[in-house]
């Protein structure tokens, strides 16, 4: 898979953004996407993916869904350095191009990437963005919509050609997060963004809650594998 020139891609994005303004469609954040758009983006030559999420994907203390999905699909990945919070750690295969930038951060919400934008934003710009937030809005779920809106607008401005896919996260113990997951799903539907329903995948797996979860919130290794498989199936 040949990696495209970042300079050429930046020029293309600039021309796309200019065309949106000229055509009177400057509100790039209003663009609607389908899962087929996401599949096409992932299939494009040299495609790169930006994953923005929380501790369910940070691969601590074991490989979680982002790492498992990347590895299963032959996509070299680099994971956000949660200690320094100034960039990504070494790639899984240091001598190979990075195709998946995993900016999952423990305890984070949709406002986290905005506060660390310059360090999180990869080069070349991403062809596909996966959003995986929701668990950390227990105390103030009313912040979901404004924070997701702000992140979507920033992503649309930086990569207007990149489809955005929203991950509907796995059930916590007793499905304590169902209200927030439904709120995220409603937001995605209203904005015209496709979703990947990990909660449904957990239910369909037939595995008991105690096997799928490592604690009250985080998926176990088995649950992480179910999650990764669901993302693979959705994007094939």
Image (cartoon, helix red, strand yellow):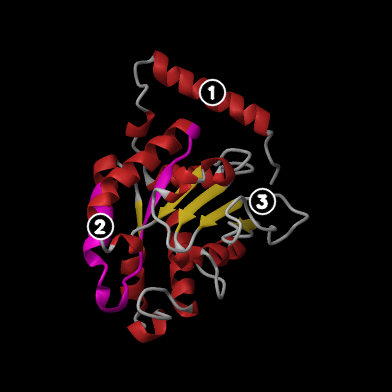
Residue 229 in picture, x, y percent from top left: 47, 67
Which residue position is annotated with label 2?
140
Select label 3 or label 2 by which is in front.
2
Mark carried by residue 43:
none
For the record, the magenta segment spans 158-187
Give the Cα separation between the discs numbered 1 and 2. 37 Å
The kind of secondary structure element at disc 2 is: loop
Answer yes or no: is residue 160 visible.
no
For image coordinates 38% across by 15% down, the residue present is 23
- Give the mark nearer the N terminus: 3 vs 2: 3
Residue 31 in picture, x, y percent from top left: 35, 33
Q: Quadrant of residue 30?
A: top left
Q: Quick one: 56 or 107, which is closer to the camera?
A: 107
Decide: few, some or many residues near mark 3? Use Cα within 10 Å; few <14, some 14-19, many ≥20. many
Mark carried by residue 98:
3
Q: Is residue 183 magenta?
A: yes
Decide: few, some or many residues near mark 2? Use Cα within 10 Å; few <14, some 14-19, many ≥20. few
- Give the mark nearer the N terminus: 1 vs 2: 1
Q: Quadrant of residue 200?
A: bottom left
How many marks do you count on the picture?
3
Q: Is residue 22 left or right of residue 42?
A: left
Which residue position is annotated with label 1?
14
Give the Cα separation between the discs numbered 3 and 2. 35 Å
- Give the mark nearer the N terminus: 3 vs 1: 1
Which residue is at the far top? Answer: 22
Select label 1 or label 2 by which is in front.
2
Q: Is residue 28 left or right of residue 91?
A: left
């Amino acid at each position: 898979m040949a990696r495209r020139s970042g300079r050429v891609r930046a020029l293309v994005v600039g021309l796309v953004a200019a065309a949106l303004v000229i055509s009177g469609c400057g509100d790039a954040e209003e663009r609607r996407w389908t899962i087929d758009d996401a599949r096409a983006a992932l299939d494009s030559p040299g495609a790169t993916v930006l994953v923005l999420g929380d501790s369910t994907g940070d691969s601590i203390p074991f490989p979680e869904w982002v790492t498992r999905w990347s590895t299963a699909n032959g996509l070299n990945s680099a994971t956000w350095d949660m200690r320094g919070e100034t960039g990504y750690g070494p790639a899984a295969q240091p001598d190979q191009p990075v195709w998946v930038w995993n900016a999952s951060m423990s305890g984070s919400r949709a406002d986290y990437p905005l506060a660390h934008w310059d360090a999180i934003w990869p080069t070349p710009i991403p062809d596909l963005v996966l959003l995986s937030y929701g668990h950390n809005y227990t105390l103030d779920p009313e912040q979901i919509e404004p924070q997701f809106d702000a992140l979507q607008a920033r992503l649309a401005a930086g990569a207007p050609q990149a489809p955005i896919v929203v991950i509907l996260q796995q059930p916590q113990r007793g499905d304590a997060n169902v209200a927030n997951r439904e709120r995220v799903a409603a937001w995605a539907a209203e904005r015209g963004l496709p979703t990947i329903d990990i909660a449904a995948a957990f239910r369909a797996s037939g595995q008991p809650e105690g096997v799928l979860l490592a604690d009250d919130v985080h998926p176990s290794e088995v649950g992480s594998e179910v999650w990764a498989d669901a993302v693979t199936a959705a994007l094939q």
